[in-house]
Image: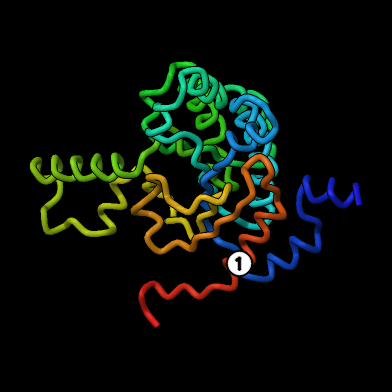
Amino acid sequence: MLNKLIKKRKGLDEADEASLLEEKVPDHIAIIMDGNGRWAKQRGMPRVAGHREGMSVIRSIVQAGSRLGVKTMTLYAFSTENWKRPRTEVDFLMRLPERFLSVELPKMMEDNVIVRITGDVHKLPQYTQDAVHRAVHETSGNTGMILNFALNYGSRSEILDAFHAMYEDVEAGVIAKEDVSEALVSDYLMTNGLREPDLLIRTSGEKRLSNFMLWQLAYSEFWFTDVLWPDFTPEHLKEAIEAYQQRQRRYGGV
């Protein structure tokens, strides 16, 4: 029983992977990693302990997704609303990218992962900016799965910024008003160049988007789980993908 639990924590076995690969795996999975604070509270620990544990989960999920053929994984790491949290928690969260990437960057290079950042990075502390810019630069030559961190990201501000930029380009004659379309709006968003997510996963039992990729998730499939993010395993990822494979995506048709 213990060995089985250990295997489940580490990831999927070959039979699990093979069965999933026989079906269509979503190209882009977006994840709202929720429940770190509650995980810590349940154990009588400070909230930052939950964030630390949640960070350790990322690598196993990224590796499992990459093995299964997921081409892009977007992780909601820090929202524009998270600045409202206690200062000590925010300071800890701002240090997490530096700590995570210092350990994981060599491993991501081995796994051929491409790191990308979506969000207003310029408003982050300089040490956070340095860490993420280094990761983006050093993995830019890789050709594997894109690991996209949504960091200091808020979808409403992203959409407003896109509209302002389009307005300025119309005024400057770069584009015509008649050129504005859904495809053009997508080109002005921070996720330009990425496919829209096929599947959204949110942990911890909450069932809302929390200002996350409101435009991009218009036709995504949603999968919610009560599992808190620090307890999320590759087996749960497999469960979400299997649920996705059972759905028919009609995009408004029949």
The answer to which image quadrant residue 50 occupies is: top right
Q: So how many labels did they put on this image?
A: 1
| Residue denoted by label 1 | 243
Q: Is residue 72 visible?
A: no
Residue name at image x 49 percent, y 41 percent: 76
Q: Write the residue at 67% across / 32% down.
A: 53
Of residue 116 and residue 61, the one placed in the foreground of this image is 61
Q: Residues within 10 Å of mark 1 (few under 14, many from 20)?
A: some
Whether 241 is drawn above or below 113: the answer is below
Query: Looking at the rendering, which quadrant does residue 223 occupy?
Result: bottom right
Q: Position of residue 201 (x, y in %)?
A: 54, 53
Q: How are the residues colored? A: rainbow
What is the quadrant of residue 106 in the picture? top right
- On the image, the x and y values in percent for residue 70 come to 59, 55
Q: Residue at x 41, y 23 (%)?
A: 124
Residue at coordinates 70% horizontally, 43% vertically from top-left?
Answer: 60
